[in-house]
Amino acid sequence: MKIALLGGSNSVKRFGLSSGLKENANIDFYNFALGGCSCLQNLDAIITHYETISKMDLIIIESNINDFYNVKTGVVPLESMKKNIAKYFSALNQLNVKVIHLILPINNNFISKETMDIFTKINNEHLSHIRHNSFSYIDINETVSTFLSQNTSLKLKMPINLLISDALHPKPLFMHQVGANIATFFFQKFSSNRRKIKFSFKKFLFPRNYLIEKTTFNFIKLKAEDFKPLSLIEQKNTFFKEKTILIDNKISFPSNYVGHKIIGISTWGEGGIKLSNNQKCIIKNFNTNYAFNEVVEEFIIDSQTYMINSDEIITEKCVNTKTKKSDKFSSVVGFLLEKKDSEIKIPPLKVKTKGENLNFLLPNLEIYLYDSHDFVKKLTEEDIDLLRDCACLVENIDLQKAYRLMSIAHFHRPTGVHIQTKLLQYKKLLNLYD
């Protein structure tokens, strides 16, 4: 079974949602998430990696927090974000793959009432598109709110702080179990369908419309290698490897892209860039990471369009940038373009169809309402020994559980030789790699 993950930093964390989804060794897992970036980056990933993503059996998505963050910080206006969400869902619907949408929670103790209103509007926008497209979803935000309101007798100070220690990231252990539950449930469904059907056409594995022809999107990707004959620079980190072009002089756009609209730029490294055509120029300053950056103002590529490095004051903000101008040279990975004359229709907020609610896949919230620091302090050397020994006892019965127990032991005793040896042995048997 093949599962893809699209999202932000909650999907990037090594231990969290992604580690839970790939816990089952029988699942081929693909992570296209990028921290700090909105749903438009997820759309960019679909267009860039269509040949891979279109062959998935299941796609897990989460972007409501990042969409909220980009609006909250003034990077993208609310109305522009609503249009971007509509564009994203139109592409998801065209993919013809089973989609599970996660609505993640935030900690309202860290934000104002006005900011919380923005979060609610973003969530409602996502939910309207989920229902419009009849997607499956897990509303973790609603579940957390309901649980806390119905369990006010819990003898805990600000329990939401124990589940979401900062404003935007739920506890990794909780998110890991969410991922594990999703993967287990759908792998069992996947396996059951395959046993019932001897031939393996994808249309029978999950209920969905089946298209034989390749999907035609309203979006295309202009990659660094399309700017021929410029030399390319390969950039890489723990998660990504991309071909880029350094913007150290004036670079004209290929003529075959004239008429298309630039809606996003993928960049690698800090620096300022000016985009210019016959009518206007846009100046943006990018952060030090591999990032996707929305272009908010309408910008159509014409025969005179070019980009050049710029140390001028920005005309548009980018996510997680600390300065309004930069004299450094950034590298461009590519541009997300909306095809000329394309139009995305935004469905009404109130629609008659309903998505499939999968909240039953969420683990019991109460067991995650521990103060992490106190819990770590209470874990004695004897406790760690017990975890290690329990893992060894069940390794011939349930290797995945043995691996999880030994991983916890390793977290609390990283220098333990026997624990390290066993953990490597389990990883090899489960075909797990860092």
Image: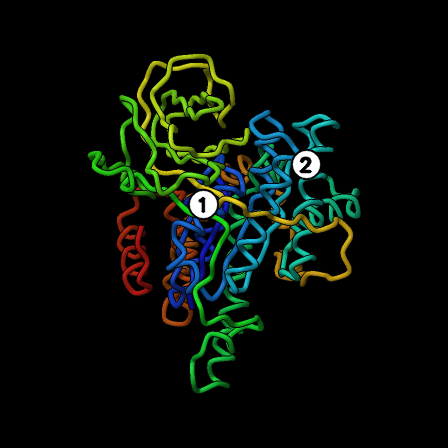
Residue 119's tag is 2
Q: Is residue 244 above or below residue 135?
A: above
Q: Quadrant of residue 272?
A: top left
Q: Amino acid at mark 2?
A: Phe
Name the mark nearer the viewer: 1 or 2.
1
| Amino acid type, label 1 | Asp
Front in this rendered view, residue 76 or 404:
76
Marking on residue 44: 1
Q: Is residue 382 visible?
A: no
Q: Position of residue 156 (x, y in %)?
A: 70, 38
How crowded pointer 1 is (Cα within 10 Å; few <14, some 14-19, many 20+) is rated as many
Residue shown at the point (50%, 33%) measured from the top left: 294
Residue occupying image coordinates x 29% and y 50%: 420
| Horizontal relation, residue 112 to residue 405: left or right | right
Front one among 416 and 110: 110
Q: Residues within 10 Å of mark 2 (few under 14, many from 20)?
A: many
Percent x, y of residue 93: 57, 59
**Marks 1 and 2, Cα distance to the nearest angstrom?**
23 Å
Q: Position of residue 172 (x, y in %)?
A: 51, 44
